[in-house]
Every structure is written in structure tokens, then in C-alpha cells.
Image: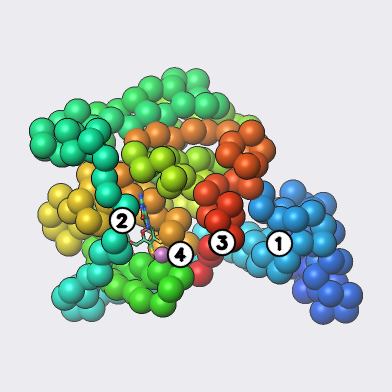
């Protein structure tokens, strides 16, 4: 069967099953195809399983909307963060020359990159919207290195299914699947609206994943971990968000 008709069958199957017998049946199909999100409470978990499975089966490469320069927000809103600790302040005082981002886990060449190295890598720019689950949004231009470039560079193993990313703020860690990690709009951003990424917006480095809500766009990132399983991290729900009652998958 061709890839298209197979996909069509799967998505129709999920929709029909969900409509006819409720989300539990849809979730069963999602499980068959390995599309249960890490925070799902089993087969009879909430609608999140269906949202995630349907999104992934419908279009891996769909792009977040891009806007013209004229629509860039004049006053973007930087969401307040908890006080940044002494480690951060020390790095900031030296203009972040010693900021590094480690890449470990399932890679043939685990390594760590300096901020200067990250800045020297190919740059991709996007004018996209970021939105908080609390309601506000803004549009900005973000520039940075595609996460896919980093994964290639460290030799991500074929078994990798998720990329975990952590902040210097220990409470902030998230993960995304490979569909988002390899997506061309997913970047490690180091510039915003033509200047080095300002600290209130996550400078020097922030994960920008415009296909997901604001909280997946973690600021001050210091470490990436490539893994095939999220169970052994934190409470095993995939990231900090579900530990606090938010969905692991925050696709928009
Ligand atoms: N390290 C860190 N990253 C973070 C946060 C944070 O408090 N600390 N807040 C998140 C939330 S809830 C949102 S909505 C966005 C806000 O992005 P902004 O400040 O660019 O508006 O950043 C996300 N990334
Ligand atoms: Mo948020």
C-alpha cells in the first residue's frame, strides 16, 4: 500500500473509531502506531493522545504560519521568569562568552558547544507568533541554528525518538519528538528582531519550536539529551509541563 493511502487509512480509522466509540478506541489505534504521548494516563487517558496522534499522522511537515515584517509586534511581551541565579549572573557579566550547550545521550559524537560555535553555525530565520497558554501572543523574528543541524553534527543515532532540552533554570525542562526536532522551523535561537537574543526573552539561547505553545519554548538552554525513552527522566511524564498539570504535547 502506498504511504499516502496507508496514512489515510490510519487517520480515517482514528477519526471513525473516536467518533463511534469515544476516545478510548482512538487511543488504542494510536498505541498500535506508537503514538501515545509520554504523559498519557494509559489507553483511557484524556484527549491528548488523540490530538497528538492525529497531528502526527496528518502532517509531519506542516509549518507554523510565518508573518510579514510589517506584523512584527512593536512591544513584545517578555513573560516574567523566576530570579536568575548566581551562575547565570556570572555568565551574563562576562557577556556569555563561557555559555555552553551540552549534547549527550544517543549520539555518536556527544559534545558541548560554546555560544560562539552556535553562532557560527548556519542561521535560519522566521517571523512567527509565540503564544502563552494564558492567552497573550506576539510576533517576532527569531534566528538561530536549526536543531536538525545539531542532531546531524553530533551523529544522532537512528533509535532517537525524543530530544530533551534543559534550562539553567532547573525547573524548566521539556522534550519534543523527532517530528518537531527535525522540523525546519525548530531552532536554537540566539537572535531576535535583529539583535542578540535579549535576556528577558531567553538569551543567550532559547529553543524555539513555533508549532507548540509558549511553555515549550524554554529559555536559557544549556543541555540537550537524545533518547529513545522518556520514562527515566523526572517523573517519567516526558517533561516538566505534565508534572505541573499541562500537556506534554502543546501543538497549535
Ligand atoms: N527558562 C524558562 N523558559 C520559559 C519560561 C520560564 O519561566 N523559564 N516561561 C515559559 C512560558 S510559560 C512562556 S509562555 C514563554 C514566554 O515567552 P516570552 O517571554 O518570549 O513571552 O516562555 C517559556 N519559557
Ligand atoms: Mo506560558
Residue under label 4? 213
Dividing the picture into quadrants, the one containing residue 140 is bottom left
Q: Position of residue 65 (x, y in %)?
A: 39, 71
Dividing the picture into quadrants, the one containing residue 57 is bottom right
Q: Position of residue 169 (x, y in %)?
A: 36, 43
Question: Mark 3, residues whose alpha carbon is within 10 Å: few (<14), some, or many (≥20)?
Answer: some
Question: Mark 1, residues whose alpha carbon is within 10 Å: few (<14), some, or many (≥20)?
Answer: many
Q: Is residue 191 left or right of residue 132?
A: left
Q: In this view, does 46 lie to the left or right of 62?
A: right
Question: Mark 2, residues whose alpha carbon is within 10 Å: few (<14), some, or many (≥20)?
Answer: few
Question: Mark 4, residues whose alpha carbon is within 10 Å: few (<14), some, or many (≥20)?
Answer: some
Which secondary structure lies at badge 4? loop
Which secondary structure lies at badge 1? helix
Residue under label 3? 246
> Disc 2 or disc 3, which is closer to the eye?
2
Marks 2 & 3, CB-CB < 8 Å contact: no
Pick the front one: 170 or 109:
170
Going from N to C along the chain, the mark reached first, 2 or 1, is 1
Tell me which residue sits at (44%, 41%) in the image. 165
Query: Distance between the Cα atoms at labels 2 and 3?
Result: 18 Å
Q: Is there any visible trace of residue 115 in the rendered image?
A: no
Going from N to C along the chain, the mark reached first, 3 or 1, is 1
Going from N to C along the chain, the mark reached first, 3 or 4, is 4
Residue under label 1? 49
Going from N to C along the chain, the mark reached first, 4 or 2, is 2
Residue under label 2? 81
> Disc 3 or disc 4, which is closer to the eye?
3
Report whether the residue tagged 2 is closer than 8 Å to ligand 1.
yes
Query: Distance between the Cα atoms at labels 3 and 1?
Result: 14 Å
Taking the image in four quarters, ligand 1 sits in the one at: bottom left
Amino acid at each position: 500500500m502506498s504511504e499516502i493511502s496507508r496514512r489515510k487509512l490510519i487517520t480515517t480509522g482514528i477519526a471513525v473509531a473516536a467518533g463511534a466509540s469515544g476516545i478510548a478506541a482512538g487511543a488504542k489505534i494510536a498505541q498500535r502506531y506508537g503514538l501515545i504521548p509520554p504523559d498519557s494516563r494509559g489507553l483511557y487517558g484524556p484527549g491528548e493522545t488523540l490530538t497528538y496522534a492525529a497531528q502526527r499522522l496528518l502532517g509531519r511537515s506542516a509549518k507554523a504560519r510565518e508573518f510579514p515584517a510589517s506584523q512584527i509586534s512593536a512591544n513584545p511581551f517578555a513573560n516574567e521568569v523566576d530570579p536568575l541565579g548566581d551562575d547565570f549572573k556570572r555568565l551574563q557579566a562576562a557577556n556569555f562568552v563561557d555559555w555552553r550547550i551540552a549534547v549527550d545521550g544517543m549520539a555518536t559524537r556527544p559534545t558541548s558547544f560554546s555560544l560562539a560555535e552556535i553562532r557560527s553555525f548556519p542561521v535560519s530565520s522566521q517571523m512567527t507568533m509565540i503564544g502563552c497558554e494564558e492567552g497573550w501572543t506576539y510576533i517576532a523574528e527569531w534566528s538561530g541554528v536549526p536543531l536538525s543541524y545539531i542532531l546531524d553534527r553530533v551523529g544522532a543515532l537512528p533509535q532517537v525518538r525524543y530530544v530533551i532540552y534543559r534550562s539553567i533554570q532547573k525547573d524548566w525542562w521539556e522534550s519534543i519528538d523527532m517530528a518537531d526536532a527535525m522540523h525546519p522551523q525548530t531552532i536554537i535561537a540566539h537572535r531576535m528582531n535583529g539583535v542578540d537574543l535579549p535576556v528577558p526573552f531567553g538569551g543567550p539561547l532559547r529553543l524555539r519550536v513555533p508549532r507548540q505553545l509558549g511553555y515549550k519554548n524554554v529559555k536559557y538552554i544549556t543541555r540537550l539529551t537524545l533518547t529513545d525513552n522518556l520514562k527515566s527522566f523526572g517523573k517519567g511524564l516526558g517533561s516538566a509541563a505534565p508534572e505541573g498539570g499541562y500537556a506534554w504535547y502543546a501543538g497549535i
